[in-house]
Image: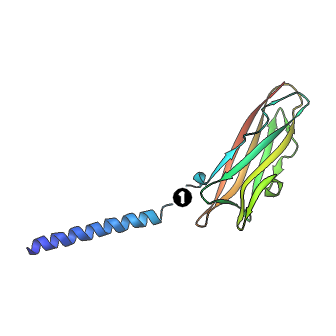
Amino acid sequence: MNLMIRALAILCTGQFVLVSGAALAAEGQQVDPTTLYELSTQGSSQKVKAGGKGTLVVALKTKNGSHVSGEAPFKIEVSGKGVKPEKDKLTLADAVEKRPVPEGVEDPRFEVPFLAASAGAAALNAKVTFFICTPKICARQQKTLSVPVQVD
């Protein structure tokens, strides 16, 4: 009987440790920052006439209660192959749309006009560097987006 009580105590203690370990693992679990936003170039001009203008759109959609830090550096570096962007460096101040929140902004959207000089295949690249934050984390993110442009 004594042996049975001791085995039961060990079993109960083992279960307690497992439950406690699982609870600690859940509490210490890190959020993947890439699940807190989506970057898109939807709405960008992909077909332009030679000598004409188009627009590169870069939209950052925040998710799950996240925001873009208003204090940490934010920049978009734009370059073109076969097309020339009107502006090659942007900050949060250049956003054409954004929703201010106490800690920064949500859903900033940028529009960069570009000139297509001559016919052929072209491309625009946007290197986006920002900090995505929640009440528990603030993580630096860097992504490069590319938009093909056909110049007729």
Specify whether 9 is left or right of 121.
left
Q: Quadrant of the C terminus?
A: top right
Q: Mark 1: which amino acid? A: Val
- The residue located at (37%, 66%) in the rendering is 21
Give the percent coordinates (x, y) of residue 25: 42, 63
User: Residue under circle 1?
Assistant: 31
Give the percent coordinates (x, y) of residue 55: 82, 39
Viewer can see residue 73: no
- What kind of element bears circle 1? loop
Q: Quadrant of the N terminus?
A: bottom left
How many numbered marks, from 0 up? Answer: 1
Give the percent coordinates (x, y) of residue 113: 86, 41
- The residue located at (86%, 46%) in the rendering is 87
Res 63 quadrant in image? bottom right
Q: Nearer the viewer, residue 127 or 40?
A: 40
Res 17 quadrant in image? bottom left
Specify whether 2 is left or right of 18.
left
Viewer can see residue 108: yes
